[in-house]
Amino acid sequence: MPKYVYRFSEGDKDQKDLLGGKGANLAEMTRLGLPVPPGFTITTDACRAYLRDGAVPDELAVQVTTALREVEEELGRELGASEDPLLVSVRSGAKFSMPGMMDTILNLGVSDESVAAIAEESGNERFAWDCYRRFIQMFSSVVMGVEGQLFEDAINEKKAEKGVKLDTDLTAEDLKELTETFKRIFAKDVDSQAHPEVAPEGVASFPQDPYLQLRLAEQAVFGSWNTERAVLYRKQNKIDDSLGTAVNVQVMVFGNKGDSSATGVAFTRNPADGTNERYGDFLVNT
């Protein structure tokens, strides 16, 4: 049976054709003993099969579930659970870097049930609702094709209503209300006939099953290999269209928990000139 899923502990830097650049390097860092949040990579073979057949390989679902179970057992947490839930990111990762060209979904696993557990576990209700509204916004636009500006308009309307300028000025209650607004946008703008998986009763509703969320996100990342911007980027940079992208599913690390957390990048060398020094930049509470 073809192997389509590799835990980060199984690969290395020499497998970029199969695991993509990101997946191979995550595997190499794991092999070296660096503190990499656990996860797994769905191979470029699976992507090519999806693009060729219009469906994921039959073996993929079981292999993804098995790898996810191993991550859950390692951490003692379950994806989207009602107590101490696990959330994951789903990111593209081709052999050659294509920054910003393909899709990413963050905070996957948040639902009506797990958001309360996130608030309780973190002791930060605002953080929990911020994660949920971000996930609905990203999933809706990236996976389901809903116009992203609809969500930005709703955020701006809420800030105007509250008389604030920054997203970070919105309270937990504000974000909870935004989450409900985002669900209504999802229900109104997702074509229930084109996406029956999120409309079991004929009316679209935001999916609460984390495994359905994950399956749809995987397919969206595969599909983003052939978006207009990605095709143009490959043409400009002479990257082979047949390579496909891997998908990296990794435990979430958060930058939006408050002024003591941040999102950014870090390097072991200065990327501008190669100087052997630590280098990085970040944004607080983003």
Image (cartoon, helix red, strand yellow):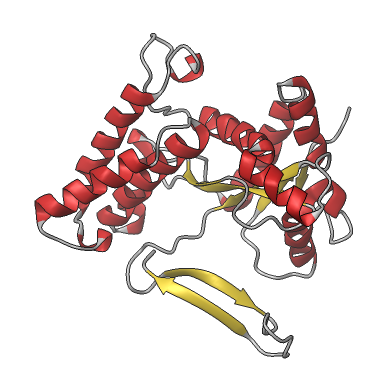
Residue at image x 76%, y 62%? 25
Residue at image x 32%, y 56%? 127
Residue 199 rendering spot, x and y as whole percentages: 42, 15
Residue at image x 77%, y 56%? 237
Vertical placement of 228 versus 277: above or below? Answer: above
Vertical placement of 264 versus 23: above or below? Answer: below
* Quarter of the figure with the N terminus: top right
Residue at image x 35%, y 57%? 122
With 40 as the anchor, is 142 left or right in this view?
A: left
In the displayed image of the protein, which residue is found farthest to the top?
201
Vertical placement of 153 versus 56: above or below? Answer: below
Residue 275 rendering spot, x and y as whole percentages: 72, 90
* Quarter of the figure with the C terminus: bottom left
Any part of residue 9 in sight: no
- Seen from the viewer's position, the closer of residues 185 and 135 is 185
Residue 12 rendering spot, x and y as whole percentages: 84, 59
Image-quadrant location for residue 54:
top right
Any part of residue 258 in sight: yes
Image-quadrant location for residue 269:
bottom right
Total number of numbered discs in the rendering: 0
Residue 133 rendering spot, x and y as whole percentages: 33, 44
With 77 as the anchor, is 98 left or right in this view?
A: right
